[in-house]
């Protein structure tokens, strides 16, 4: 049997006829994940809270209008997720739980509201979407995928982020448990732990502060949203079918 040479085409991920839901998909890392799926032939339903971000995303993604669906959703609210799930134009193949917020304060100053807001969005939000959408997956698919966005902070903790670290560590526990429970039903469930990622938020920070952050990373730069999207597409692909319950750090080696 002869071995065929790889072509550029078959080295790329192919999500033709695949549909993804990306929570928090209208801006930041989630927007890049959405764009990468669309550019790889997939269809995406963006579930985002922010009306402004959804409006901007609609404009920016106008050339993909046949492949993209928009829903204004608050993942902390069960009813909001149920309404969005009912509006889906397609069965689901891939769920990317990406929506997240921070309310950073040292433990002494952290209010009950700061705690609840972060746990509700970053952890209970994942329970809501996953619980409601697990029934909406393409029943015939043998490659159902759930990718949860955690953080290096969930693995190692971080000063001023008791709420966020607890939620992101919870995401890892949930990922591993769902990987065990749902594996036999054709799902893989994995998490990604991003390190310092350059987003609109970091662009507003002084260059000196950014240089200091980059200096802590062995590869000497902040991560890009594309770095995270590439990892999400890999874990969502057919090629990753034997990867289940893992936490993939995408952090330039910052915590080694
Ligand atoms: P952004 O704030 O840029 O984007 C997150 C999106 O999620 C926003 O549109 C936001 O809307 C939306 N969102 C917030 N709350 C809800 C909700 N209740 N329901 C639905 N949508 C909601 O975040 P990033 O792109 O920076 O982060 C994306 C993910 O990556 C998060 O889970 C974050 O914790 C994680 N992460 C990010 C890192 C980074 O360096 N940026 C590092 C490690 C992990 P709104 O603007 O209205 O709040």
Image (cartoon, rainbow, N blue to C red):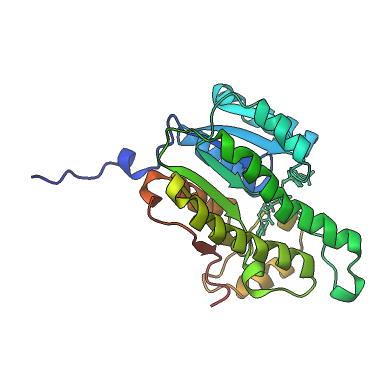
Left or right of 66? Residue 151 is: right
Q: Position of residue 121 (x, y in %)?
A: 76, 51
* Residue located 68% across and 53% down the image: 199
Residue at the extreme bottom of the image, as rendered = 256
Left or right of 197? Residue 54 is: right
Looking at the image, can residue 191 be seen? yes
Residue at the extreme top of the image, as rendered = 66
The N terminus lies in quadrant = top left
Looking at the image, can residue 21 be seen? no
**Labels in figure, total:** 0
* Residue located 57% across and 66% down the image: 221
Q: Nearer the viewer, residue 94 or 3?
A: 94
Left or right of 38? Residue 207 is: right
Q: Nearer the viewer, residue 80 or 12?
A: 80
Q: Position of residue 176 (x, y in %)?
A: 54, 61
* Residue located 84% across and 58% down the image: 116
Q: Quadrant of residue 16?
A: top left
Q: Position of residue 18 (x, y in %)?
A: 46, 33
Left or right of 212? Residue 34 is: left
Q: Position of residue 5 (x, y in %)?
A: 19, 45
Q: Quadrant of residue 198?
A: bottom right
């Amino acid at each position: 049997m002869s071995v065929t040479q790889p072509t550029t085409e078959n080295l790329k991920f192919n999500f033709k006829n695949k549909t993804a839901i990306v929570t928090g998909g209208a801006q930041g890392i989630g927007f890049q994940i959405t764009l990468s799926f669309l550019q790889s032939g997939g269809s995406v339903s963006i579930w985002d809270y922010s009306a402004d971000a959804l409006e901007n995303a609609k404009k920016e993604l106008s050339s993909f209008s046949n492949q993209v669906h928009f829903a204004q959703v608050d993942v902390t609210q069960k009813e909001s997720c149920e309404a969005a799930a009912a509006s889906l134009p397609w069965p689901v193949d891939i769920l990317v739980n990406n929506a997240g917020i921070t309310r950073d304060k040292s433990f002494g100053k952290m209010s009950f509201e700061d705690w609840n807001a972060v746990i509700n969005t970053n952890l209970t939000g994942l329970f809501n979407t996953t619980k409601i959408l697990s029934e909406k997956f393409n029943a015939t698919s043998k490659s159902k995928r759930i990718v949860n966005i955690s953080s290096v902070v969930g693995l190692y903790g971080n000063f001023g982020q008791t709420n966020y670290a607890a939620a992101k560590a919870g995401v890892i526990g949930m990922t591993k448990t769902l990987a065990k429970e749902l594996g036999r039903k054709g799902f893989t469930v994995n998490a990604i732990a991003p390190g310092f990622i350059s987003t609109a938020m970091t662009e507003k920070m002084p260059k000196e502060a950014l240089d200091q952050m980059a200096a802590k990373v062995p590869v000497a730069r902040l991560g890009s949203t594309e770095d995270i999207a590439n990892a999400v597409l890999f874990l969502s692909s057919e090629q990753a079918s034997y990867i289940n319950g893992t936490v993939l750090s995408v952090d330039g080696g910052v915590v080694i």
